[in-house]
């Protein structure tokens, strides 16, 4: 069995910063689980893998539905920066137009949200995802090549010196 261990994920802070922001969950018997903060998990899930994008969308939707009745400004801004569901982005843009307008520069698709252009929001979300997938591929390509080189070197037959 082959196991690849990553000490750094693309776009995610180093471990000490992640640990400071962690979320602790305890189950009924008191067992504690230390988890990535949602914002860090969202960033970590922006990969080239097909299975990560639906999970990313569901994580954000769950957080939105859990906290939408009384969100603080930081949470609303987080949703506006990261939400993957066009209908919820449109709702957020209507409910929080000022913050939506302020975040157009770092996330241009919010301009389409502000304009109420649903079709453009859908298109822009796809383009945003495609850019993230490509950035992830580009980040990991040299590392994958290095792993392959190491793997082949480890299984190559050793020829004793003459």
Image (cartoon, grey):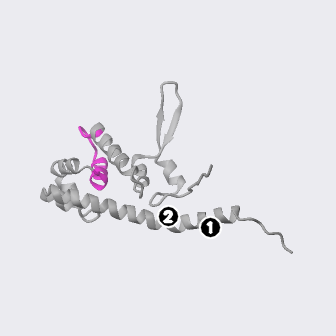
User: Is residue 46 one of those drawn in magenta?
Assistant: no
Q: Residue at x 54, y 53 (%)?
A: 16
For the record, the magenta segment spans 67-84
- The secondary structure that dominates the magenta segment is helix
**Mark 1 secondary-structure assignment:** helix
Estimate the x, y position of residue 54 in percent, counting from the top left.
34, 48
Estimate the x, y position of residue 96 in percent, counting from the top left.
19, 50
How packed mark 2 is, by other alpha carbons closer than 10 Å (few <14, some 14-19, many 20 or more), is some
Instruction: Determine whether 76 is above or below 9 in the image.
Output: above
Query: From mark 1 to mark 2, how far is it between C-alphas?
Result: 14 Å
Q: Quadrant of residue 107 in the image?
A: bottom left
Q: Residue at x 41, y 65 (%)?
A: 135
In this rendering, position of residue 10 left or right of residue 59: right
Of discs 1 and 2, which sits in the foreground?
A: 1
User: Is 29 in front, or is 124?
Assistant: 124
Q: Quadrant of residue 118 in the image?
A: bottom left
Furthest toward the right, the residue is 162
Q: Determine which of the numbered discs, if any, sits on residue 39 in the image.
A: none
**Sooner in the amino-acid sequence: mark 1 or mark 2:** 2
**Res 109 seen here:** yes
In this rendering, position of residue 151 left or right of residue 49: right
Which residue, given by chain and number where applicable, does mark 2 sit on?
140
User: Is 44 in front, or is 35?
Assistant: 44
How packed mark 1 is, by other alpha carbons closer than 10 Å (few <14, some 14-19, many 20 or more), is few
Q: Quadrant of residue 97 in the image?
A: bottom left
**Mark 2 secondary-structure assignment:** helix
Which residue, given by chain and number where applicable, does mark 1 sit on?
149
User: Is residue 72 one of those drawn in magenta?
Assistant: yes
């Amino acid at each position: 069995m082959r196991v690849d261990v990553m000490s750094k994920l693309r776009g995610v802070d180093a471990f000490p910063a992640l640990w400071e922001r962690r979320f602790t969950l305890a189950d009924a018997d008191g067992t504690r689980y230390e988890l990535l903060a949602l914002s860090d998990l969202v960033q970590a899930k922006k990969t080239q893998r097909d299975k990560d994008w639906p999970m990313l969308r569901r994580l954000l939707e769950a957080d939105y539905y859990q906290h939408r009745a009384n969100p603080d400004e930081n949470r609303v801004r987080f949703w506006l920066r990261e939400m993957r569901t066009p209908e919820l982005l449109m709702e957020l843009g209507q409910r929080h137009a000022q913050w939506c307008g302020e975040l157009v520069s770092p996330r241009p698709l919010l301009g389409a949200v502000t304009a109420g252009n649903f079709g453009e929001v859908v298109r822009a979300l796809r383009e945003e995802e495609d850019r993230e997938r490509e950035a992830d591929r580009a980040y990991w390509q040299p590392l994958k090549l290095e792993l392959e080189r190491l793997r082949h070197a480890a299984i190559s037959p050793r020829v004793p010196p003459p």
